[in-house]
Image: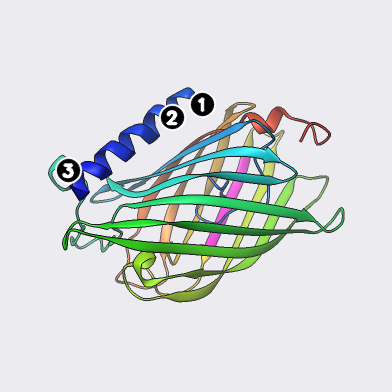
């Protein structure tokens, strides 16, 4: 039953994406919010001995507030183990996570934004056929500078044991996006502290194939040796990039 529910939910999410996450650098959320009545779709693939899919969908409600869904940790490499624990040498130990997300940003002044986000949902523990409660929440401060060519954030997070599949953890996260060439090529990097499966740095670049579609690629560097290195590929569709501040 758990596997069937997982398949149906993931299928529904992909259908929704075809019609249209918190917004991230790679793994660390940005303070920038989906514009009112707009959709945001982001698919991230972590590629090593497995291919892991992480899907984010968000909808803007206005007044710097968004809600959405995250489907995290789907193994696409081997269909026989698509929804099971990966115990290979790569140590990517996420079970599939299905989370509702919400994020609100407050513009303190022209230089400082404070953002609070929550991710609440279920961890499908196929090994024990249990559905567990997963939680990942954060608060961060962010800013734009250098004529808005640089976006940077720093903040803290909390995730419970059933989110990390290891132990509950508090930590620090940072992220940056630098426009290197006429809003076509960006440097992107982020880092999450700790020793959890999510505690990694990713450094790479984004190339805008259109004003609303950046394709990002980078290299994942784990904080601890038992976690996995990976090539990260991320495709985003973000119509909010064409919306002016007044329209949001």
Magenta stretch bounds: 186-191
Residue designated by label 3: 78
Report if the CB atoms under discs 1 and 2 are less than 8 Å apart.
yes
Structural crowding at the residue carrying mark 1, measured as other residues with C-alpha within 10 Å and reported as few (<14), some (14–19) or many (≥20):
some
Residue 99, position as x, y percentages in the image: 43, 51
Q: Which residue is mark 2?
A: 16
* Element at label 3: loop
- Residue 74: x %, y % from top left: 30, 47
Task: Pinpoint residue 178: horizontal percent, then vertical percent.
Answer: 67, 48
Q: CA distance from mark 2 to mark 3?
A: 24 Å
Rendered residue at 17%/47% (across/down): 1
Residue 132, by quadrant, is bottom left
Residue 157 has which mark? none
**Which of disc 3 and disc 1 is earlier in sequence?**
1
Asked if residue 76 can be seen in this view, the reply is: no
Prevailing secondary structure of the magenta residues: strand
What percent of the width, then of the height, locates residue 186? 62, 42
Secondary element at tag 1: loop
Residue matched to label 1:
20
């Amino acid at each position: 039953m758990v596997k069937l529910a997982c398949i149906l939910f993931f299928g529904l999410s992909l259908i929704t994406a075809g019609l249209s996450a918190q917004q991230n650098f790679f793994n660390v959320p940005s303070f920038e919010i989906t514009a009112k009545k707009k959709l945001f779709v982001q698919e991230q693939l972590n590629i090593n001995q497995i291919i892991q899919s992480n899907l984010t969908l968000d909808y803007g409600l206005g007044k710097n507030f968004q809600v959405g869904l995250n489907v995290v940790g789907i193994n696409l490499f081997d269909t026989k183990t698509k929804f099971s624990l990966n115990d290979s040498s790569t140590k990517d130990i996420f079970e599939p996570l299905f989370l509702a997300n919400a994020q609100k940003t407050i513009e303190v002044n022209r230089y400082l934004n404070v953002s609070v986000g929550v991710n609440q949902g279920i961890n499908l523990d196929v090994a024990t056929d249990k559905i567990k409660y997963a939680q990942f929440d954060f608060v961060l401060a962010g800013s734009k500078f250098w004529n808005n060519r640089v976006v940077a954030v720093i903040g803290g997070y909390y995730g419970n044991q059933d989110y990390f599949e290891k132990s509950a953890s508090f930590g620090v996260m940072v992220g940056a996006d630098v426009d290197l060439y006429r809003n076509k090529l960006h440097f992107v990097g982020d880092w999450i502290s700790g020793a959890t499966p999510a505690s990694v740095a990713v450094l790479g670049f984004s190339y805008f194939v259109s004003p609303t579609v950046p394709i990002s690629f980078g290299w994942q560097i784990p904080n601890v040796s038992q976690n996995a290195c990976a090539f990260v590929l991320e495709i985003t569709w973000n119509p909010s990039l064409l919306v002016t501040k007044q329209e949001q």
